[in-house]
Image (cartoon, helix red, strand yellow):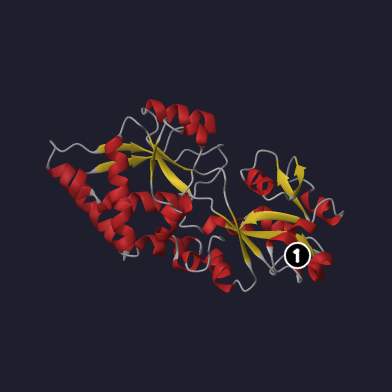
């Protein structure tokens, strides 16, 4: 229904634009890729196009295109500030972007990326079966990449961190017991590195416990187009009320959602100190039901 509706609205936009030359299409450029061989997440594009379609009657017709060349994080924020070659992108909350972009206050991944699973070696399975509270995890060390946002989170809880410089030889470090737990997003289980990890003899996806670190993704809009930010917030809110955001998430992340729905072990809430205070409480009503009904901040 969502795709059919969007196709219908898009056709109306084109007909209107052709029949009424005085109505100009608002050009919108979004979602740069980091490198030329990177793939865009189709969910982000479908969601934003749906939000734009939802608000045509309020803001008028538009045209959407991708940037003509890749952009790293530093280049992305520079171009967002300028607002010429880039108007929007998807990114987590970044403190150093404050004042340089307008954050649309809607967590577009609805909490899915916040569920954390652990890779380990099966030799630790018996020890993991005894984990029932957060303090028990301090008996194990965590592998983390330098600069990962979750490093600060684990430091807050005084976990032992072993730094890794790259994914190359990652499982060798687990096999040699350099560390016992590698924390990853639930969706990362299904990307190439996750599948490769599980192909190693002795590789083990821990199912005795999980973690929840609130890691929201937002749409960042150029400060030169505040009306675009308002338009997207309105469109996303309308789509969410109709259940269409959830439908798109299920379409693109069904396996990750299946894992979340099948969780039986304890889920440990780790506060993300990288976010402004109150972010989780503000966004919680917008999260997937399976998440907002099962994750409770301790206290």
The answer, for residue 143, to whether it is visible in the render is yes
> Residue 29, position in %: x, y?
37, 37
Which quadrant does the C terminus fall into? bottom right
* Front residue (pair 74, 49): 74
> Residue 104, position in %: x, y?
37, 44
* Front residue (pair 21, 185): 185
Q: Is residue 53 left or right of residue 117?
A: left
> Residue 31, position in %: x, y?
44, 41
Q: Is residue 168 left or right of residue 241?
A: right
* Front residue (pair 246, 277): 277
Question: Which residue is drawn at the image coordinates 38% and 53% (left, top)?
Answer: 47
Question: Which residue is drawn at the image coordinates 49% and 42% (left, top)?
Answer: 93
For the view shown, which residue lies furthest in the right direction?
A: 176
The answer, for residue 71, to whether it is visible in the render is no
Question: Which residue is drawn at the image coordinates 80% and 48% (left, top)?
Answer: 169
Question: Which residue is drawn at the image coordinates 82% and 63% (left, top)?
Answer: 201
Q: Residues within 10 Å of mark 1 (few under 14, many from 20)?
A: some
- Residue denoted by label 1: 204
State the count of labels. 1
Which quadrant does the N terminus fall into? bottom left
> Residue 238, position in %: x, y?
28, 57
Q: Is residue 227 left or right of residue 42?
A: left
Q: Is residue 30 above or below residue 261?
A: above
Q: Is residue 55 above or below residue 264?
A: above
Q: Secondary structure at mark 1?
A: strand
Q: Is residue 98 above or below residue 148?
A: above
**Which image quarter: residue 166?**
top right
Q: Is residue 187 left or right of residue 68?
A: right
Q: Is residue 79 above or below residue 113?
A: above
For the view shown, which residue lies furthest in the front direction?
A: 299
């Amino acid at each position: 229904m969502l795709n059919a509706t969007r196709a219908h609205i898009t056709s109306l936009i084109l007909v209107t634009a052709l029949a009424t030359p005085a109505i100009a299409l608002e050009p919108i450029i979004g979602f740069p890729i980091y490198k030329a061989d990177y793939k865009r997440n189709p969910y982000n594009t479908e969601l934003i196009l749906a939000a734009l379609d939802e608000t045509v009657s309020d803001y008028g017709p538009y045209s959407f295109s991708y940037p003509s060349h890749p952009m790293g994080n530093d280049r992305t924020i520079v171009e967002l500030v300028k607002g010429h070659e880039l108007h929007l992108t998807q990114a987590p909350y970044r403190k150093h972007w404050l004042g340089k972009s307008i954050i649309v206050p809607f967590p577009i991944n609805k909490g899915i990326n916040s569920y954390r699973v652990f890779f380990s070696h099966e030799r630790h399975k018996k020890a993991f079966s005894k984990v029932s509270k957060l303090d028990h995890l301090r008996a194990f060390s965590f592998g983390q990449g330098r600069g990962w946002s979750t490093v600060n989170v684990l430091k807050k809880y005084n976990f032992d961190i072993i730094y890794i410089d790259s994914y190359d030889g990652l499982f060798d470090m687990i096999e040699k017991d350099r560390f016992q737990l590698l924390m990853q997003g639930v969706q990362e289980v299904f990307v190439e590195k996750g599948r490769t990890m599980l192909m190693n003899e002795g590789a083990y996806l821990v199912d005795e416990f999980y973690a929840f670190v609130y890691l929201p993704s937002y749409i960042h809009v150029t400060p030169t187009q505040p009306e675009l930010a308002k338009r997207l917030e309105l469109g996303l809110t309308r789509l969410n009320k109709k259940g269409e955001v959830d439908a798109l998430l299920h379409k693109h992340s069904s396996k990750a959602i299946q894992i979340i729905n099948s969780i039986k072990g304890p889920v440990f809430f780790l506060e993300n100190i990288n976010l402004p205070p109150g972010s989780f409480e503000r966004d919680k009503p917008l999260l997937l039901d399976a998440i907002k009904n099962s994750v409770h901040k301790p206290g």
